[in-house]
Image (spheres, grey):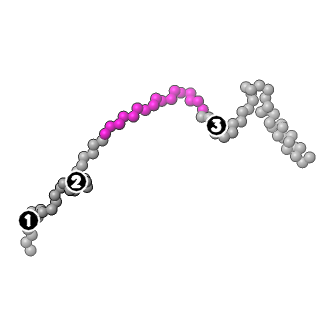
Amino acid sequence: MRLAPLLLALVVFSAPALAEDAATSVVILRGSSAPPTPWYEPPPEPTVIVQPVYVPVYYPMPGYGGFIHRHGHAPSARRSR
């Protein structure tokens, strides 16, 4: 009989959920609920435009090392000590 008040409380508090018609009944959702329907029109999908980007090369690329001859140059002026 110790559980009788608990059972009575559950029945009394759950009475509004046991409505006669579906319009006034309470719906309990479990888990992830569906997103609400927006009241506005969603924005249009963006248009993706692919454009090549040309970056200026100020220094020779490492792959061009075989074509650039850097040896055999002499200093422009001799230093006298």
- Whole-percent x and y of residue 12? 83, 37
**Of all residues shown, which one is farthest toward the front?**
66
Instruction: Describe the element under mark 2 as helix, strand or loop.
Output: helix
State the residue in front, 3 or 74: 74
Residue 37 in percent (x, y) is at 58, 30
Q: CA distance from mark 3 to mark 2?
A: 60 Å
Q: Tell me the crowding category of disc 1: few under 14, some 14 to 19, or many 20 or more residues within 10 angstroms, Cα based.
A: few
Residue 37 in the magenta stretch? The answer is yes
| In front of the other: 34 or 72 | 72
Amino acid under disc 1: Ala
**Who's the residue at 16% across and 58% down the image?**
69
Q: Earlier in the sequence, mark 2 or mark 1?
A: 2
With respect to residue 36, does 6 lie above or below?
below
- Front position among marks 3 and 2: 2
Q: Are marks 2 and 1 in contact (CB under 8 Å)?
A: no
Q: Is residue 1 left or right of residue 50?
A: right
The amino acid type of the residue labelled 2 equals: Tyr
Q: Is residue 48 left or right of residue 8?
A: left
Q: Residue at x 71, y 36 (%)?
A: 28
Calculate the distance from the C-alpha at mark 3 to the C-alpha at mark 1: 81 Å
Q: On the image, numbered disc 1 is attached to which residue?
A: 77
Magenta highlight range = 36-52
Residue 10: quarter of image: top right
Which residue lies at the image location 64% right of the left edge and 39% below the top edge? 32
- In the rendered image, which residue does mark 3 sit on? 33
